[in-house]
Image (cartoon, coloured by chain):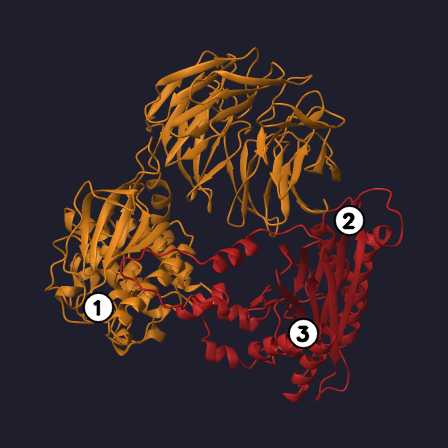
Amino acid sequence: METKHITTPFGGDDKGSGKPRQQLTSGATLVNRYSIQDVIGVGGMGSVYRARDLHFPNVVKLVAVKEMINMAPDPLVRQTIVQNFEREANLLATLNHPSIPRIYDYFSHDDRSYLVLEFIHGKDLETVISDANGFLPEDQVISWAIQLCDVLAYLHSQKPDAIIFRDMKPSNVMINHNGDIMLVDFGIAKTFQTGQKGTMIGTEGYSPPEQYRGEATPLADIYSLGAALHHAITRRDPRLEPPFSFAERPIRRINQNVSVEFEAVVNTALQYNPQDRFPNALAMKDALMNVARKTGTLDKITSALPVSSGGIKPMWDFKCEDEIRGAPTIHQGTVYVGCYDNNLYAISAADGKFQWKYPTDGGIVSRPVVHDGNIYFCSEDQRLHVISSRTGKVLWTYYTEGKIYSSPRIADGHVFFGSEDQDLHAVNATSGRAAWKFSTDAPIHSTPLIYNEMIYFGTESGSFYALDFRGTLKWRFSAKRGITSSPIIKGQAVYFASLDGTLYALDAKSGWAIWKFRLGKGTVSSPALADDYIFIGASDGFIYCVDTRTAKEVWRFKTDNQVSSSPAVFKDSIYCGSVDNNMYCLEYRTGRLRWKFETKGPVTGSPVVFDDIVYFGSTDHHVYALFA
Amino acid sequence: MADFFKKLFGSKETPTQPKVIDNATTAPLSDQQISSIIASQLPKYEIKQLIAGVGQSVGKQRDHNEDSVMALTSTISGSSENVPFGLYIVADGMGGHQFGEVASNAAIRLIGGSITKKFHSFLYNMPTQALQESLQEVMEASIMDAHQYIQREAPGSGTTVTAALVLGQQVTIGHVGDSRAYAVYADARIEPITRDHSLVKRLEELGHLSQDEVDNFPHRNVLIKALGQGESLEADIFTIPFPQNGTLMICSDGLWGVVNEKDIFRIISEAPNLHRACQSLVEAANAAGGPDNITVILAQLIG
């Protein structure tokens, strides 16, 4: 990421480059946390490094560290520069879009400031263009262009001020290992170009005419996108040509394979007068979608991108002796998962090697929880087990009077879980002594949700309870059939589904129903949330995406059998298993299939995604680790 | 960008204290910033009190009022605590049509009536069973009732309606037409909650109009959806958290089309209470010519 290749000139006049700038060397450590591995790019203000985050000792978590060297001689100016840097870092941290790298951290030290970002496996578009043998396929460029319009529209829609990217060019576009684009280099470096008021920001060749007059508007980004697309589809680098001379290099004269329609879109974006271009990025996206539809590329785009189906190879798999129906937990490089062979397994997350197992007297569907170095989980042997994560030896157990399918939740020094004995149990997390029990009218399979000193859970008779920390009933809601699904909360609404085939949104404080969404059939799946969307599987075989504000369906995805697994969200994808034996990865905004992975048995357990790896168990007795 | 940052964290809190940067390891965020971020993210379940004010005027250039308004503020006693309840509706009858005021009046009565009927036993009686429908279902059914009534009883007329049902700290909005709901925050942000169903807005969304053209569009009052108009009606129905530390404003175009957002914010923040704020907003619209009927409701959750 952030690859200014050493051979690539950085845009603009590189002032002050006469001074020597010392690069960090491999093995150096920043703030006792980021171990520098390599230089991956050099910019005008410093270098970009690949580094390992040492806070994750058991896994290799890579980050990109962008360095900016403050060379202003005047202390006041230096201070302003650091403040600007911090302001920009804060602004970036508020952005949330799949095509924008996440900001993890920033810090300043001596005369240098550092920004720690998501490391992106991939190549920048400039390299892709120059490495290609011949022209890039049009449908490929269109699909990138559509994604670029999306991310520009996102930036331009920021409130109260639109964010203008100002520097849309192929070297600022990364293509990741999924073939999706990431927009990098948010101009942080430019705040370090000191004392040049009204500096023209942007790279010559890609910048629109008005940017030379100091105007930066969303329409300027549209022009630059047009210029980048022109470069990508013609392989003619605009930096080597006179400014604004695209009209003298008609696309189809250089590359006859390009459709008339696509050429027209690029030409519209490149209009000299801003008002002759697309009015906004979404309009340009619409135009691109129309081109894709007309030329039939849309089908190719949607089907070309998924990595593969069935072709996915697991990183590792681990065989147990019976079915796995629960979800694993990942903690400090170890996967903990319960199995119907009565054992809790500890498996190395990196390579799937067996570490230890702990036997109980019943099947385990409950998802383990790690707390203070100990593992808490429940079993059909009616007990809550607490064992040491280091040794796998039991510390204490707690008996209930029924089988336990609910997963424990820990808050405020207590463990909360439901049991078939119809009680919700609150147990002291250190002593193992019962704090209180709350009796209901039916077995509890749902995992309690603890939020703001409230406890929410459903029962198999269809009651949904809200208790306070003392175990006092605050309110109760009745669904028409059992609630096995575990609740989830966002803002002030609590969400869960029922075997009555309804996804409910209740006011967390009062229990009033805000909305109800009808699923095709009942479900035991628990919902997951991202942005304004809620995701859930149902026994009609669909995975649903519903808007949490309007209760309208956004999309649904059909699998070939019931979906009892609960979806997990990671970056811009959701992951969910189905009784049709597959684990699915869908793009969460559209429901488009990214990949699926077939096991030899129904996948009823729920996946967990951690550090770009999906972990889940199947009824084929295996635990799998796949690249997300 | 500086402005953005200022607004993001509240203007008072911009960290401008000079720092010595040499050898300094900078802290990412100040305590103040962190606490304001946390406050905005963690909704507290403390009991809040709902208060509201209403303002209305026929304006300076019309001789009769086609706007209708309802504001009802109460609490519902729950098993453990009282839950704020509010029902706020603004309807603006369509001027070009006959019986504009009939339509807006019917909308208020029917929507207000059927929603309060649903809550009657919770507000005025001892409830025997929980409400069967969800809040969004209640809102949608009441709007459809009013739509059909207006079609039947006052054919040819139409009205906008923007209704907000507050229960606890959630607001369920039902919206048709170009009356508007806004969230007005203490740091001068004014965020529209509803989207106009008007021709000018549609053209703007499609990208056919520039801001200048939007401001001078000759057919600004043409609606593409109205209660009582058209066979099928799809109202916008959604639920959002009540604006945290802010004011919910519902108004007709007699206010939003005449008084700019900056003045609206100034008037609300300077007024000693919500009633006065409503009065001053109406006065401001009249002072600016009062070309249309003016209706405004302001509501806050305090405490």
Q: Which mark is residue B252?
A: 3
On what subunit does the disc labeled 2 rest?
B
- Chain identifier, orange in the render: A
Q: Provide residue B27's location: percent of width, then percent of height.
A: 38, 55
Q: Residues within 10 Å of mark 2 (few under 14, many from 20)?
A: few
- The picture quadrant where one finds residue A188 is bottom left
Mark pair 2, 1: CA separation: 60 Å
Relative height, residue A376 to residue A303 (above, below): above
Q: Which mark is residue B81?
A: 2
Q: Which residue is mark 1?
A: A72
Residue at image location 76% in from the left, 57% down from the top: B85
* Lower sequence index among marks 2 and 3: 2
Do the residues indicated by labels 2 and 1 lie within the same chain of the protein? Answer: no
The amino acid pointed to by label 3 is: Ser
The subunit carrying tag 1 is A
- Chain that is coloured red in the picture: B
Give the amino acid type for the residue marked by disc 2 in the picture. Glu
Residue B165 against residue A451 in the figure, above or below: below
Q: In 3D space, how far apart are the residues under numbered discs 2 and 3 (Cα atoms)? A: 34 Å
The image position of residue A166, as x and y in percent, is: 30, 66
Q: Secondary structure at mark 2?
A: loop
Q: Is residue A223 left or right of residue A480?
A: left
Specify the quadrant of the image occupied by residue A363: top right
Q: CA distance from mark 3 to mark 1?
A: 54 Å
Q: Nearer the viewer, residue A34 or A333?
A: A34
